[in-house]
Amino acid sequence: MTNARTAPNPFLGKTVVCLLLLPSALPIALGVPPAATAVAAGEKPVCRIHVDPGHPWQPPFGLDRVGRPLAVTVEVVADASSPREYVLVGYRQGKELARTQLALVGASPCQCHASFDTWPAELALLATTPQGAIVELARQSVEVPQLEAEAIARPDRIVNPIDLGTVFVPYDWLLLGGDQNGTVDVAAVNRSDEIADVVVSAWFESAPAAKTTAGVRMVRDCRAQHRLPLPAAPAKVDRDLLHISIASAAGKELWHKTIPTMLVRNPPAWPEFGAVETKLRYDAPISVRGSDGTYSALSYADAWESNLQDVVVALPNGTRFVFWRGSSYIPFWAGRYNTGFCYEWAEKNPPADACDAVEPLMDKELRYSRVRIVESTPARVHVRWSYQSCDLQYRVWGDSAVEDFYFYPDGFGIRTLTLQCHPEDNYELSELIVLTPQSAYPLSVLPPNLVDILFLDGQKHELAFPYLGAVDTGRNRTLAVKSRDMPAVYRIRLHKNDPATAVYFSPFDRKLPEMVYRPFFDNGQLVTPVYWGSHWPLARGNTTGGAINDRLSLTPGHNSILTWGYFHQPATLRTTAAAMLDTLGRSRVMAVRTWVWLIGLTDADDASILQVARSFSAPPSMEVRGARLDTESHAFERRAIRMTVDSPVVNLRISPATVCVDPVFELSGVPGDLAGIELAGRRLGAREYSWDGKTLWIRATLTGDTPLKWDFNSRSPK
C-alpha cells in the first residue's frame, strides 16, 4: 500500500508529498519489474511517471469527472545513498506550470500519488544530489485533450419508469414520456488558446431542424457548465437518438455525443390500488454468454413465450411492486429513480452435482417460474409467484416454492413463503438486494447509509457501506451489531436521492443477519460498496461472479448487502411433514414450511414504521357482538382477523396489545352491503376504509380500547 501525507514546503513554497518506501517483496504489485527492485550503491535511481486516468467505477462520475485534476503516480527504486528529496514538475510549452516536492520515507521501492489542478503537457521528476546538484530522473509527456466535455440529459421531473410502462432503462439513456420535457447539462474544460466562444446544440436525429442552441464563453483551463432545454420530442417515433454538439463560433465541431432516447406516447394508466398484467418495455438487447465464452445479443421481445406477462402492483402511496419476466419473476420494489429492491427467494444450498447456485434467478427462460393475480379488489391485492430453484443448466431436485404477496391500501404487504423440500435441506430465504440499471456504477447511485436496523424497543443502528465488520470471512464480513433476542425492522435505501426505503420485518426472527457482503476491489481500488453481480437480472449464460466486469454496460445488475445465510431462518408460521409427490413425480417424505414477513416501501418516519411492525406482531384482543370469531381467528399471512357475521349490526371493542394499525377483517356470512362504519363514535368517510364484500380494511391507528360498529344493509343479500 501507499501512505502519503501533505505538509507545507518552506523551501519551494509548494506541496510536499511524502513517499512511503515499501518492502522489496512488493515490486510486482507496484508495477515495477523484479529486475528494478534494487539498485547498486551510487547508481542512478530507477524512476517511472504514470498518468492515472482514474478508475471508471470510482468517483467522480458524470459531469463531475470533467475538469478533475491530473492524477500522477511516481515509482522510485533507490538505494540508501540515492537522493532523498524529489520534485515533480509540470511543464507547458517549455515553461514550468507547477511543481510538487516528494520526500522519500522508508526502504525502497516506493510509490506516491500527486495531482495537478491545471494539466501540464509534460512531467519531469527532478532530484537534488547530496552535493546539491539538480538532476532529471524521468520525463513523461501528457496527452492533453483540447476540449474535455460530458453531457447528461434528464427529464424535467422525475416519473417512476414503471409508470411509463418501462423497466430499468439504461442509466446513460434518456426516457421521456407523457408531458415530460427534457434538458441537457453540458460540462466542458478548454485547454487550448484556440477555443474561446463555443455553441452548444441539441437535436433529435429524427427532427434535425428542431434544434436548441446556446452560446457559452470558454476560458482556458476553466470549467464551464450550461443547462440547455431540449427541443420538443418527436411525436411519431418511440425511439430516437439525441445529439449533443459543441462547435466553435465559426461552426467547426469540437465535440459530439449521442444519447439513445426512449419516447413514451401513451403511458399505462395504473389503478390507484390494484394489480395489472402487462408487458413492460425494455429497448436494449439481452446479453447472452454462450457455453464457449462468447457473447451475443437476444431481442427482448423474443426472449420468452408470448403468453407470459409481467405483473405490476400499484399502491396508493405511489409505490410499485413488480413481477418482471427479466428478473425471472422474482419480485422487487421499483423505485422512482430507476433502481429496485428485492428480499430474495428460497435459494437451495447447492448439491455437489449442481452447476453453480440453485435458485430461481437461474430460470432465465421461465421454464418453472410463474406469476398469477389471485385477487385485486379495492380492499386487497393478492399475487402468487410459484417456482422451482434450478441451477445454471436448468436442473431441479424436486423441491418447490410458492410466495404469496398480499397488499393493502396503506402500502404495506406481507410476503408469505411456503417451501416444500426434503426435511434436511437447507435454504437461504432472505437477502437484501438492490437492483441497478445497465451502465450504473454502484458507487454513483447507492448511498453509503444503505441499511438501518430498528429494534422494536426503538434502538437504532445505521449501517454504513462499505462495511467493516468484526470478522472478515473472505467473501463476507460478520455483522458487528449484536442480536438482542428481539425482532428488528430493516429499512433499505434504493437510491441516494430517493427518500423512500424498503421495509422488512419478521416477528418470528429474533436474530440479526449472519453476514454483510464485502465490497469489490480492482487493482487495489475499492469499486463497489457491496457485492455486485451482472448475472442477474436479465442477462443469460453467466455463472455467479466475484469481481466487476464490462457487462455493466450491457445489462442491469444487482448489489447484495446483507444475507441471513442457509442456516438461519425465522421460526415458521406452520410446519408439516409427510409422504408426498415432489415436482419430479417421486413419492417421498417432504417438509412443508411457511414463513411470513411484513414488507413495504415508504418514506414514513421510524416511529410510524415501528408502530406498523408492533401491530403486525400480535393481533388485538376484542369483544364481539353480532358476529363470531372463526376457529382460525387470525390469519398472520394476510394480517387479517377472521369472523362470521350473524347480524346486520356488528359491535366490536378492540383492545390492542400495544398498537393496532389499519386493521383488516375477513368476513363471511354478511347479510348485505356495508352501509356504514363507526369508529369511536365517528362515522368514517369513504376514503377511510375499503370493502370488497369479503375483506374490510380500515385506516386507523388504535392505541387503547376502541369501539367499532358495522351496519349492513340486509335488503341487498350477498
Image (spheres, grey):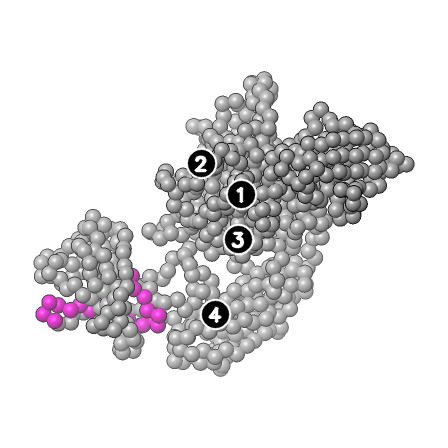
Q: Are marks 2 and 1 in contact (CB under 8 Å)?
A: no
Contact (Cβ within 8 Å) of mark 2 with mark 4? no
Q: Which residue is mark 2?
A: 514
Q: Which residues are drawn in magenta?
A: 113-132
Please tell me which of labels 1 and 4 falls first in the chain: 4
Alpha carbon of mark 3 to alpha carbon of mark 1: how far?
A: 25 Å
Nearest to viewer (mark 3 / mark 1):
1
Name the one closer to the observer, 72 or 466: 466
What numbered label is drawn on residue 495? 3
- Residue at x-position 78% and y-position 48%: 685
Residue type beneath disc 4: Ala
- Which one is in front, 146 or 373? 373
Are dots 3 and 1 in contact, CB under 8 Å? no
First along the sequence among labels 3 and 2: 3
Percent x, y of residue 499: 56, 54
Q: Secondary structure at mark 2?
A: loop
Asked if marks 4 and 3 touch (Cβ < 8 Å), the reply is no
At a point 59% along the width and 28% down the height, the residue shown is 573
Quadrant (top left, top right, bottom left, bottom right) of the C terminus: top right
Cα distance between the residues tagged 2 and 1: 21 Å
